[in-house]
Image (cartoon, rainbow, N blue to C red):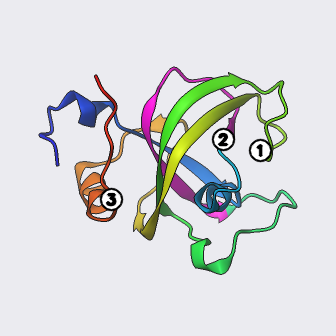
Amino acid sequence: MPHPDDPRLRALRAVTVPQPWAGHIVEGRTTVLGRHHPTRHRGTLLIHAGRGPELTGVPLPRPAIRRFGGFVAVAELIGCHPADGPCAPVPPASRWHWELARIRPLSRSVSARGRPGLWRPTNEQIRLIERQEPLWWPCL
């Protein structure tokens, strides 16, 4: 793991996504994350599944990946654009689409409490994630 003062570690962010959307990202059914706000962040993004499901009428993912309250995948956030194009499936109420690439599911979720917006995971959470999936840091 990088030194705590490493700028790559300070730049790492996580986002909490409710089920069924977190599971659809893990399964590769969607590479777009619908959000209500834009972001300038690019690079490694940890996908955290929220503690409860969002009642959307969209089916929950298969039981093997239907996890709640923990990190479930590592992805690269490569872009952000207004929700005016044919990106699907994403939550219908979203105004912005965050484009994901190189999505790598974790074999076991890493327990964590979610937060709104982009947030910084703890060093311990990062260490547990790196045991399963090396984090490919963006070039700074």
Location of mark 2 (residue): 33
Q: Are marks 1 and 2 in contact (CB under 8 Å)?
A: yes
Q: Is residue 92 left or right of residue 38?
A: right
Please name whichever residue, 111 or 74, is drawn nearer the observer in this view of the structure. Answer: 74
Can you say whether 67 is above or below 46 in the image? Answer: below
Q: How far apart, in angstroms, are the residues tagged by discs 1 and 2?
A: 6 Å
* Residue located at (31% from left, 37% from top): 137
Q: How far apart, in angstroms, are the residues tagged by discs 3 and 1?
A: 26 Å
Q: How far apart, in angstroms, are the residues tagged by discs 2 and 3?
A: 21 Å
* Residue located at (45% from left, 56% from top): 113
Q: Are marks 2 and 3 in contact (CB under 8 Å)?
A: no
Q: Give the x, y percent position of residue 13.
A: 41, 38
Q: Amino acid at mark 1?
A: Val
Secondary structure at badge 3 equals helix
Q: Give the x, y percent position of residue 117.
A: 54, 36
Location of mark 1 (residue): 90
In the orientation shown, which residue stands out farthest toward the front? 102
> Which image quadrant is residue 61 in?
bottom right
* Residue located at (62% from left, 23% from top): 38
Indicate yes or no whether the magenta region holds residue 56: no
> Which image quadrant is residue 27 in?
bottom right
Location of mark 3 (residue): 129
Can you say whether 90 is above or below 67 in the image? Answer: above
Which residues are the magenta region? 33-52
Q: Amino acid at mark 2?
A: Leu
The secondary structure that dominates the magenta segment is strand
Indicate yes or no whether the magenta region holds residue 43: yes
